[in-house]
Image (cartoon, coloured by chain):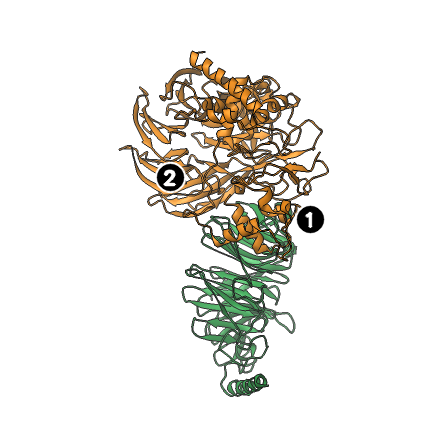
Amino acid sequence: MNCKFHFAAGASLALLAMALLSSSNRPVRAAEADTQSYASPLEVLLSPDGARLFVLCQQSGEVRVLNATSFAVVKKIAVGREPRGFSLSPDGARLYVTNSWDDTLSVIDTRTLTVSATWPVGAEPSSVVEDRAEKQLFVANRISNDVAVLDAHTGTEVKRLAGGRGASYLTLSQDGSRIYATHIYPNLPRVRTNLDNRTAPESEITVIDTARAVVVDRIPLHAIAGVFHLAFSSDGRLGVATEYHPKNLVPLAHLEHGGAFAYTLTIFGADVGKASVEIPLDELERYAARPFGVAIAPDKSRIYVSCGGSEIVTVINVPKLLQYAHAHPGFNAQDLSASSNYVVARIGVGHDPRGLTLSRDGTRLFVANRLEDTVSVIDTHSNRLASTITLDGPKTISVLRRGEQTFYTARYGFQGQISCASCHIDSTFDGITWDLEPDGFGRDIVDNKMLEDIKDTEPYKWNGGNPNIPTECGPRTEKYFWRSENYDNATLADLAVYVRSLPPRPNRFRQANGEQTPAQERGQAIFERTVDKFNKPITEYNRCSYCHSGPKGTNQKLFDVGTRRATDNSGLLKSPMLTNIALTTPYLHDGSAHSLEEIWTVFNPDDKHGRTNDLTKDELNDLIEYLRTR
Amino acid sequence: MKKLGVIAFLLVAGTAAFAAPPQAPGAQKSHTAQAASDPPQVALPRFRFENFTAANGLPNDHVYAVLVDGSRIWAGTDDGLGLYESGKWKVYTTKDGLAHRAVISLALDKRTGDVWAGTMGGLSRISGGHIDSFTQLNSGLSNDVVYGVSVEGENVWIATAAGACRLNLHTNQWSLYNERNTPMFEIWSYSVSATPTKVYYGIWGSGVLEYDQKTGKWDKYDDPDQETEMVLFKDQGLIHEIVTSVSYMEKDKVLWAATYFGDSRYDGRYWHNFLTKDSGLPSNFTNIVRGVDGKRAWFGTDKGLAYYDGVNWAVYRPSLKDGKPEMTVRDAAGTVTPISVTSAPAHNYILYIDFQGDDIWVATAKGLSHGIREKK
């Protein structure tokens, strides 16, 4: 440990102490100025001739082009904010980059290594593929939950196809006839039951006919929430998707009682049979937390999976995997002995490994270590780390970066089961309701909340039980979740600083000119009204604008809004903030409401959650249009 | 008193105007002018009807809507949504996420391949075999009774029992149209026909509403006779206020409108109305009209299926007398010729029509009918 680290750790400890003593958290806020500029490599690609390595850098907003042999930097190409996905055109002449916070697509000429065009696309574009005919581009839009189809020559959007919720990753099938789309948040239940907030999540792989650009199938993924990259074998007979399998129906705490997640693969295709099979990656004492990238060796002998939370690449023997799958059809997430049948190596890499790619001959595997500013190069013959490419990140690690590493690693969790990012995917949320505490099955069910912009909105938790972020992230997390290792004070301070630093993503429902639509204006008037439609005064605590006051839409106080269930220990709930509220379905403390509308059409019969029962349907729609701009 | 005087004048004038012409098209001539086996005087399409009922896989005999999707046929029934594909029926129910068992309207998003189903309990989207449903409780949908749905571009236009609405598929924003922001004084919307330039709504009791896509403004077409069932102003406006179906032919800029008291054609300047007494329409009680183009249209009535080619009429139905298959052709002179046929739609009460090339699919009160066009 170097001196700088000692100094930083000491400073963090002091900050934590002050933070815990002061409700204003000023010392921690001061530390937020401690920022460094990192590359944060998220994805990697090789040029068709294998001569160049393209590295997508999330934080620096650029594509770095490296010589794939010497790893020397050829060029740094600036793209948009928070680039999340990229892919090459079939002929390798163009590199497409999705800029998730700019809602644009950068087109890079791979000959000149310059951006030749920047096209507007949908909300939070996350990945892109071009069809083999080079006529159409497909872009997965995470916020609008769809896949946009663009004219590949002009970038003009032709149409959008309904994807899964949080549509994020696209893969072209080996023959190019299909595109497979995954999504990171579970779909809402299609059929309502009395157990609505007590159902396992359901996800899908959306299958698109490339030529017709229509959805032709949706492969169901039962009990899955969070599906990431997908890959096909070179013969097209085997498809593999990485995914999380949350165990949200049983009390989460403590992990030693059975775990919060299984991390699995769904495999499908002719090699597997008619039905897909869920394959666990975990083993007892050693989970494969947060699987993300996946690649299949050209000879179909191995599958490589990056596991961001475990900081490893898992290597799977394909023949043995298929042997297991044929003997164990269906779902195998709970079997912690299974992976010993087919996992042949776990190769340690850097912090938060994400995208990976194989050389054409399959001898080298490149892995982007997002929170280390490195790319690991693995010799696939020996399954050993051959070298590490550094991306010239800052020599010192900032408080924020250390906090982010702590947020994403699973090393603190019992058996390495979970990290903060297991539930807060990409530092957001997971769209799941959880049975968090060990107070019996089905008691105090809570919806997982978005983390963005939570700074200065204490107290935390739905019941307001945690006075500040250090308490939320520290004793609570350690007590209920980790059960194996506490954070030291410096680490906790780093984590708190990172969580407090999370900014809100751009709101897509506001107009570019800053003006409101007529519906939004009307909705704001309803939000702020003090008398109802019968000219009767609305009591202060029954106005939208009282509980949801201030720039973040919370007065940080507790109220009973009539949503208490028999299984809830208390009806008093902290008024949640409204930042980007449109994105965080489901709603209410227990996820009962599947839409903003249902908060009032279903769960507010007595006007306890604001005076709304005098509103017409038009007016309720207006109110929601306004809320979507918050 | 002055008003009564005006009405009296209109009655007299109207009677004088429309009773006079001795050659009025409605003056039907003998129904037995020719023997059934004689060739028709005009060439109108002939069909061999194959009928589907619950006995051969249809979810339910009461078929409210039918939609042709290439080689696939969707049938909205009283007990689920049927999909006929490769000779087999697959049935979607509320267990699959369908908003309600009774599916009363259907539309295809030709760009995405998604099917939209209006039900008695909300609006459902069937995409890649999965169903998502929108209701007045979980979304901005104005009402759960969805009588009509039409997809144009990125917008889904919906006709409900409590007004019209539009879902923008890009923004997920719902826009509601009713008595507060349109000239609609009744909000019971029965039908919608959306095109890139115009969107038409048929309103039960409030005529036809027209939305201009370019200006975003609404206009309205009413029966000049208002809510009376008299026809004082023949061909001077919509035939009746109770509009059950609209079908806009954008290329020809012609609107077809069906009501419970006759039907109308509007070319942007002139109206032409159709009544049983002066056309080949088998009944004024019309549930649906589907234009082929600005000149030709199909009508679904309570007394059979009718086709109008711009001059002549054909009616296809089980005979009202004995239930035997029947086809009649009525020419411009009003001469009605029976045509010998061996099949007819499953029932006379026709609720929905769609086309599959030269073939026709017809939803009836007792089964779904596939009219297979006979080449000769």
Q: Name the chain letter of the residue that bears numbered label 1.
A: A
Residue A583 or residue B360, whichever sits in front: A583
Residue A241 or residue A319, whichever sits in front: A241
Q: Which quadrant holds the N terminus of chain A?
A: top left
* Badge 2 amino acid: Leu
Label for residue A105? 2
Check the image and name the residue furthest to the right.
Answer: A566
Question: Is there any visible trace of residue B57 in the rendered image?
Answer: no
Question: Is there any visible trace of residue A11 in the rendered image?
Answer: yes
Labels 1 and 2 positioned on one and the same chain:
yes
Residue A364 or residue A390, whichever sits in front: A390
Residue B117: give x, y in percent of width and height.
Answer: 56, 54
Left or right of B231 on screen, residue A573:
right
Above or below B199: residue A68: above
Tag 1 near tag 2, CB within 8 Å: no
Q: Name the chain letter of the residue that bears numbered label 2.
A: A
Task: Give the chain letter for green.
Answer: B
Residue A464 or residue B335, whichever sits in front: A464
Label for residue A568? none
Label located before the other in sequence (1 or 2):
2
Above or below B346: residue B138: above
Residue B309: give x, y in percent of width and height.
Answer: 46, 71
Q: Give the labeled residue for mark 1.
A: A606
Crowding at mark 2 (Cα within 10 Å: few <14, some 14-19, many 20+): many
Task: Give the chain letter for orange.
Answer: A
* Badge 1 amino acid: Asp
Q: Secondary structure at mark 1?
A: loop
Q: Secondary structure at mark 2?
A: strand
Of discs 1 and 2, which sits in the foreground?
Answer: 1
> Residue at left 56%, top 51%?
A526
Residue B338: give x, y in percent of width and height.
Answer: 55, 75
